[in-house]
Amino acid sequence: MSYPPPIYDRDTGEISASIRLTGEMPEIVYPNGNRVHYLATGQGTGGLFGLYRWEFAGPRSGPDAHFHKTMTESFYVLAGEVSIFDGKGWVTTRPGDFVHAPAGGLHGFRNEAGAASMLLHFAPGAPREAYFEGLARMAAGETLTDAERAAFAIEHDNHWVD
């Protein structure tokens, strides 16, 4: 395997790094207390990846088994315990554990043992912000018909399985 073609073609570097300090407020706070920090959006990385810090507040929550057709998703547990579905069953992961679900790979995640946090990485950098924000609106009481809910899932490349 070799390096990919260059995505920067100048001979000198530039001042373009971004920094997000740990004390910055989350972009989303769900009614159950879960918080989402947009560390790097697909738009901000030129579509290369998206990186988010997900903080579970404590009540059991998280998506059931699903897969994506357009992107991979990876999880890195920072604190607490997170149950992650690996296509065969739910596995308890702890700080330092890493899970990668390639496109088409069945996965899901949830907290079952109280507060926890993890990094979510999507590649390429799909616009997951609209998905997270839509979930927050639904959690706050916005109602959708079954057809609208199905269209929302497909629009955001979430393919649910039983």
Image (tube, grey):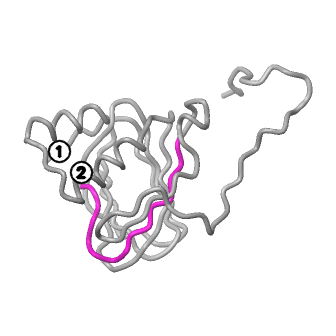
Query: Which residue is at the far bottom?
Result: 114
Identify the element where label 2 is drawn. Answer: loop
Q: Nearest the camera: 118 or 134?
A: 134
Determine contact: label 2, label 1, CB under 8 Å. Answer: yes
Residue at image position (8%, 41%) is 146
Identify the element where label 1 is drawn. Answer: loop
Badge 1 is on which residue? 161
Is 116 placed left or right of 148 in the picture? right
Q: Quadrant of the N terminus?
A: top right
Start-end of magenta stretch: 50-63
Kindly indicate the quadrant of the structure image that contains residue 92.
bottom left
Q: Picture coordinates of residue 71 (x, y %)?
A: 42, 35
Query: Which residue is at the far left?
Result: 146
Badge 2 is on which residue? 65
Q: Picture coordinates of residue 93 (x, y %)?
A: 41, 68
Q: Is residue 17 above or below residue 117?
A: above
Residue at image position (39%, 70%) is 56
Residue at image position (29%, 70%) is 32
